[in-house]
Amino acid sequence: MASRISFSPGHVALVKEEVASPSGRGVLVTGASGLLGRAMLAEFQKGGWRAVGTAYRRARGSLLRCDLLDEEAVRSLLNQHKPDVIVHCAAERRPDVVERHPEAAENLNVHATGALAKEAAAAGVVFLYISTDYVFDGRRPPYGEDDAPNPLNHYGRSKLAGERETFRQCPGAVVLRVPILYGEVESVAESAVTVLWPAVQQGAAESCVLDHCQQRFPTYTGDVAAVCRNIAERRLQDASVKGIFHFSSKEQMTKYQMAVAMATAFNLPSTHLIPLTEAPPGVSRPQNAQLDCSRLQLMGLGVEPHPFSDAITSCLWPFLQDKRWRQTVFH
């Protein structure tokens, strides 16, 4: 079952301590300071797991600082905490940044992934790698797990290489491909969905042109985390749960439509938002990389995605300029 969204003005809190697990199950979440990693850590803690999160540049609180490119440090981390499952969220996920810094992205998305998968296999730990719909070219959706990948940009190629390294080093691993994500953010710039919020709030004072060409399926991080916990718990009981899975929301939206939906949810004007129906310049992106999620559903591992309007409201209202809105809507 999907978790209920809290309408608290606070954000997903960083873990303050290693939560004890009555069942003894332990999970290690990489990239736990990031958008998905925070939701992942919170979901496993809620499920009673002993949850440990790692980060590097943004390690704070009790998150463990670990350079995933340092194989000895990774090995030491696993020896110390002895997780049953690793959920590998750490990645360079911004296509424009990957194009500008391909070597650094390759190191994190491919080499660090391979090293972590190798250590997981050696320690007998379940390895779950988070990948992307950008491994597909977007010309013939929807895409099943067995459809041939054909990434259009370096980000997609690096994540596909990470998938292949995962299975080369750890044949029993799980790969979960997901689309564009949003969730409880520390700043609206943290997600390619919530980054649209300032344009929505600026109102009629200034028009804003937004992509109305690329079809996306914005997916809530809490739902992805719930799916990962479902997979992890089933896998500890059934070793046949392995290979590639897809998870995505069901709502198809361009960035223009996402922005209009945000405006509607907050009763804000949207006439200043202008749809751009030609492909925007810059890094090539798939036109429509819709994921077929039937394998996950058939195995009973999926969750019902939160409606976009509900989840995005929960994520964005702490950043609303008119603070009176909180009182009129929630009190």
Image (cartoon, helix red, strand yellow):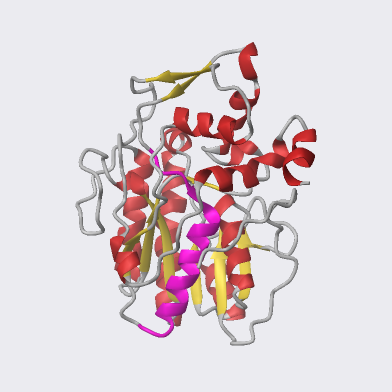
Q: Is residue 44 located in the magenta-colored stretch of the structure? A: no
Residue drawn at 38 percent across, 22 percent down: 280
Note whether 132 is above or below 224 in the view shown.
above
- Can residue 119 be seen at all in this image of the molecule? no
Q: Is residue 233 located in the magenta-colored stretch of the structure? A: yes
Residue drawn at 34 percent across, 76 percent down: 241
- Can residue 77 be seen at all in this image of the molecule? yes
Residue drawn at 59 percent across, 74 percent down: 47
First to last magenta residue range: 216-238
Q: Position of residue 210 (x, y in %)?
A: 47, 23
Note whether 12 is above or below 121 in the view shown.
above
Left or right, residue 61 beside residue 249 = right
**Which residue occupies the foreground of this view, 55 or 18?**
18
Query: How many numbered dots are placed on residues in this image?
Result: 0
**Which residue occupies the foreground of this view, 320 or 115?**
320
Q: Position of residue 11 (x, y in %)?
A: 70, 51
Left or right, residue 151 beside residue 306 = left
Residue drawn at 64 percent across, 86 percent down: 22
Q: Magenta part mainly helix, strand or loop?
A: helix
